[in-house]
């Protein structure tokens, strides 16, 4: 699948974001609240809430925090009305970027997102301007020692996933968003908790960036991800392992 090799980039950014625990928990809590409010507060009857709970547990969010966030949504205790907004635009070197937000103030969020783009060599476009370059996919990753390639392939087929790539660094499974929860739960029943599991925008093709371009792009993405209203940032860049190591240093 095109763009599937971007796992290393996804993992790099998630690692940086996970370091900011308090902010991450606040964003996960907001998604839990909105998910609980948008459907049944029972995760068995609400796929979005089930996904949000899984993401919160993956980030080691305390059980009490998860329960309070769900209660706020189910009981209407949170007075804020959050709008789901998707922003699209271009970063340095023509890299396509999708920003997903949950906000109680559209004007504030739009201004903040536009500022992050313009201050880092990018420009914000209209909705749909880059979305066609991406595919919404459920992604699950296990370390290489979780199973043999044959065992993982068998489990993935039985679970109903679309694709699996097994290498010396790990197993990378892709599935449709509609089947994501079923696939994740089937694999976790067999192999335990996944190293990475979530819904991602995966690029159909990628744009290579050099070290200087990557630094500017990462600064923009980190600014966006540091915004309280922004839930996720996806982009179609491709950064070499050598440059990633330099950025991580």
Image (cartoon, rainbow, N blue to C red):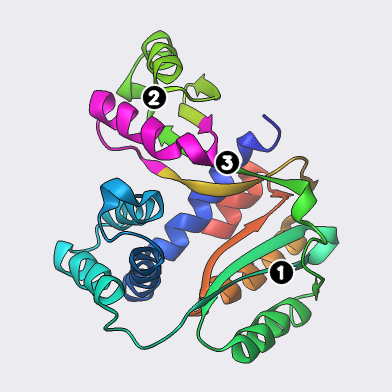
Q: Nearer the viewer, mark 3 or mark 1?
A: 3
Viewer-closest of 44 and 215? 44
Q: Secondary structure at mark 1?
A: helix
The image quadrant of residue 5 is top right
What is the magenta range? 174-196
Viewer-closest of 209 and 56? 56
Give the Cα distance between marks 3 and 1.
Answer: 27 Å
Mark 3 lies on residue: 137
Q: Secondary structure at mark 3?
A: strand
Is the stretch drawn in magenta largely helix, strand or loop? helix
Residue 122 left/right relative to 69: right
The image quadrant of residue 30 is bottom left
Mark 1 lies on residue: 216
Residue 139 left/right relative to 144: right
Q: Residues within 10 Å of mark 3 (few under 14, many from 20)?
A: many
Q: Is residue 230 above or below residue 59?
A: below
Q: Residues within 10 Å of mark 1 (few under 14, many from 20)?
A: some
Q: Position of residue 70 (x, y in %)?
A: 26, 68
């Amino acid at each position: 699948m095109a763009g599937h090799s971007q796992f290393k980039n996804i993992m790099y950014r998630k690692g940086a974001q996970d370091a900011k625990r308090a902010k991450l928990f606040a964003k996960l809590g907001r998604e839990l609240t909105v998910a609980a409010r948008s459907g049944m507060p029972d995760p068995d009857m609400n796929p979005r809430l089930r996904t949000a709970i899984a993401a919160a547990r993956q980030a080691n969010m305390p059980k009490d925090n998860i329960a309070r966030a769900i209660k706020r949504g189910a009981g209407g205790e949170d007075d804020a009305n959050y709008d789901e907004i998707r922003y699209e635009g271009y970063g340095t070197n023509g890299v396509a970027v999708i920003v997903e937000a949950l906000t109680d103030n559209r004007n504030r969020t739009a201004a903040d997102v536009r500022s992050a783009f313009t201050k880092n060599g990018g420009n914000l476009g209209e909705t749909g301007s880059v979305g066609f370059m991406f595919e919404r996919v459920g992604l699950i990753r296990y370390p290489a020692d979780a199973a043999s390639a044959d065992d993982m392939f068998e489990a993935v087929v039985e679970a109903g996933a679309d694709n699996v790539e097994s290498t010396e660094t790990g197993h990378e499974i892709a599935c449709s968003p509609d089947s994501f929860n079923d696939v994740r739960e089937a694999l976790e029943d067999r192999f335990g908790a996944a190293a990475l599991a979530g819904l991602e925008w995966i690029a159909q093709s990628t744009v290579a960036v050099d070290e200087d371009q990557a630094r500017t792009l990462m600064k923009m993405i980190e600014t966006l991800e540091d915004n309280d209203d922004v839930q996720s940032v996806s982009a179609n860049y491709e950064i070499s392992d050598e440059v990633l190591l330099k950025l991580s240093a």
